[in-house]
Image (cartoon, rainbow, N blue to C red):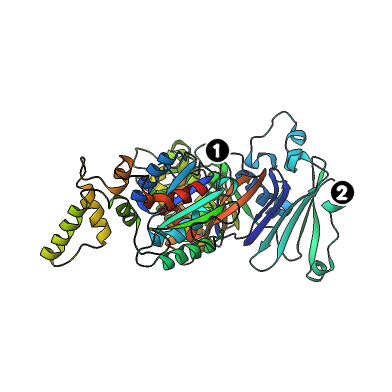
């Protein structure tokens, strides 16, 4: 699990440091303060060899369909579009290890540094992940550290076929189907059961909500589908990190508390670290309340804000967030 | 839901809704339009409030002056020390001298009411300002009579005294903050000088 993160010269971040990461981390902040960029940095840092598959361009943002990806995506990863200065993304883990990503021009030595003796002794390796847009990507990590499986939920609509595959991965586990249905019933109380069915070319998830026949979940609310997607990924337990952009998307504030209870329990049970973004006060309050009910309050709110032309992170621990909520002070 | 946001570089933290209304009236009287007032709740909430407030959007970038006003209650020295401890916990400047601003971005000042030494509260200060009013002896007589007949005095007595005084106005029944807004306290009375000096330093 990541305990700290430092992002240098990446997108709008000159040098962003977050020193207190928790099991579940919620990023808040005004528009254009880098919430999604922080998720992108985590994605690039943690995906390792899988960083270019699926194509990074479409993971969090709309994809250019006119073949100008190299022009539109990659140069803009650099702060102020300054390619002369290498992007560095650094994370330290709970076990005392570290992982570092460098992005830069192939001829630039700082993009592919020699390992210091200390790291060599600790059996770290520099691995070339590949290149994109004319830039080289290298990661420095312990030899035995495997790439993490990173689940991503962007603001794009979910892929129904992938949903069905994920759902099937969940329901083969004993008791998982009932648990998933129980969680989803918080969102849709009339839900009786979920089924993955193939009535056409592709499998789809159908829900029995008391109608004459089961309805494809793509025809239920956006929030239902999104949460089913997130819970399925969590319960399949094949990812170790979840990145969720605008977690409140499509979800009514009145059920945010139940959503966070479900996420908190699942993250703790499955050992998954979650990074999510939000614009919603109700979402922040619901997350705080959900983690207040857990033994360790393994949660932190990080607000990104622009101060003197740089973006910095302000982290709220339990005491600070509790006081802010009580006084109804803005935290986003 | 309307959340409190930082809109001004000068922030004054006061105790409770009554304090907010009172100080709003006073800063309007002084023409200090750029002072924004925040309610930190009760004395036991100040530590948490300062912690959260110092993290709030706009604090680091925008707040240049921070004033904190608290009642002395039974011990002015202990009240001031409690505020200083809360400031230190929030990693904010701790002014060495009472009622003098110190530090930088923000500069911080602490005002204990009714003054830096005596026990009491905002009501005590307001009483000092109206104790020359012709009806004041009636207020004292009334509360003396109450104590005799009931066998005990109301606590805190200064809250009862100010309510009894406000009951004598043309519009009875106003709470202290509202009374300040309709002009029932004489701002030019010497009792308010320390407070006005403090606010003008912000």
Q: Is residue B102 above or below residue A74?
A: below
Question: Which callout, 1 or 2, points at the residue further toward the start of the chain?
Answer: 2
Question: In the image, is A129 to the left or to the right of A257?
Answer: right
Q: Which residue is mark 1?
A: A157
- Within 10 Å of disc 1 (Cα), the crowding (few <14, some 14-19, many 20+) is few
Q: Is residue A90 above or below residue A253?
A: below
Closest to the observer: A48 or B36?
Answer: B36
* Residue at x 63%, y 46% (from the top left corner): A307
Quadrant assignment for the N terminus of chain A: bottom right
**Callout in the foreground (1, 2):** 2
- Within 10 Å of disc 2 (Cα), the crowding (few <14, some 14-19, many 20+) is some
Q: Chain of mark 1?
A: A
Q: Chain of mark 2?
A: A
Residue at the limit of the structure toward the bottom, as seen here? A121
Q: Is residue A265 visible?
A: no
Task: Using the rendered view, name the quadrant where residue A22 is placed.
Answer: bottom right
Residue A80 at x, y percent in the picture:
75, 40
Q: Which residue is mark 2?
A: A108
Residue B196 at x, y percent in the picture:
44, 48
SS of the residue under disc 1: loop
Q: Is residue A201 visible?
A: yes
SS of the residue under disc 2: loop
């Amino acid at each position: 699990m990541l305990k700290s993160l430092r992002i240098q010269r990446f997108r709008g971040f000159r040098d962003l440091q977050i020193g207190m990461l928790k099991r579940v981390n919620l990023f808040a902040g005004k528009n254009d303060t880098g919430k999604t960029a922080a998720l992108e940095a985590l994605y690039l840092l943690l995906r390792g060899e899988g960083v270019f598959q699926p194509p990074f361009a479409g993971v969090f943002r709309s994809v250019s369909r006119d073949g100008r990806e190299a022009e539109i995506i990659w140069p803009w990863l650099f702060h102020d579009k300054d390619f002369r200065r290498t992007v560095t993304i650094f994370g330290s883990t709970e076990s005392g290890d570290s992982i570092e990503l460098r992005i830069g021009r192939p001829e630039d030595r700082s993009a592919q540094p020699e390992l210091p003796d200390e790291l060599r002794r600790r059996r770290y390796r520099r691995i070339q992940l590949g290149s994109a847009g004319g830039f080289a990507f290298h990661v420095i990590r312990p030899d035995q550290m495997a790439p993490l499986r990173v689940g991503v939920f962007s603001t794009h609509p979910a892929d129904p076929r992938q949903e069905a595959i994920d759902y099937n991965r969940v329901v083969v586990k004993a008791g998982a189907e009932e648990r998933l249905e129980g969680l989803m019933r918080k969102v849709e109380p009339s839900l009786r059961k979920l089924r993955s069915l193939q009535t056409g070319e592709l499998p789809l998830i159908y829900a029995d909500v008391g109608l004459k026949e089961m309805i494809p979940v793509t025809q239920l609310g956006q929030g239902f589908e999104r949460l089913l997607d997130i819970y399925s990924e969590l319960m399949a337990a094949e990812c170790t990190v979840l990145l969720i952009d605008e977690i409140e998307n499509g979800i009514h504030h009145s059920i945010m508390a139940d959503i966070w209870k479900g996420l908190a329990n699942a993250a703790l049970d499955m050992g998954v670290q979650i990074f999510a973004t939000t614009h919603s006060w109700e979402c922040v309050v619901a997350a705080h309340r959900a983690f207040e009910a857990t033994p360790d309050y393994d949660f932190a709110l990080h607000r990104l804000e622009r101060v003197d032309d740089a973006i910095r992170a302000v982290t709220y621990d339990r005491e600070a967030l509790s006081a802010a909520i009580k006084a109804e002070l803005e935290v986003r | 839901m309307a959340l409190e946001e930082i809109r001004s570089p000068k922030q004054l933290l006061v105790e409770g809704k009554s304090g907010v209304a009172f100080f709003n009236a006073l800063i309007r009287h002084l023409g200090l339009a750029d002072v924004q007032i925040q309610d930190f709740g009760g004395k036991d909430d100040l530590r948490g409030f300062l912690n959260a407030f110092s993290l709030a959007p706009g604090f680091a970038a925008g707040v240049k002056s921070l004033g904190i006003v608290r009642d002395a209650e039974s011990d002015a020295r202990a009240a001031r020390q409690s505020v200083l401890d809360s400031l230190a916990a929030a990693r904010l400047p701790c002014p060495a001298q009472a009622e003098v601003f110190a530090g930088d971005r923000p500069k911080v000042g602490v005002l204990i009411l009714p003054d830096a030494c005596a026990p009491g509260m905002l009501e005590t200060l307001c009483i000092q300002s109206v104790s020359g009013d012709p009806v004041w002896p009636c207020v004292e007589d009334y509360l003396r009579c109450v104590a005799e007949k009931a066998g005990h005095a109301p606590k805190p007595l200064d809250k009862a005294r100010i309510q009894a005084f406000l009951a004598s106005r043309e519009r009875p029944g106003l709470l202290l903050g509202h009374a300040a807004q309709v002009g029932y306290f004489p701002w030019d009375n010497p009792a308010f000088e320390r407070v006005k000096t403090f606010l003008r330093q912000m």
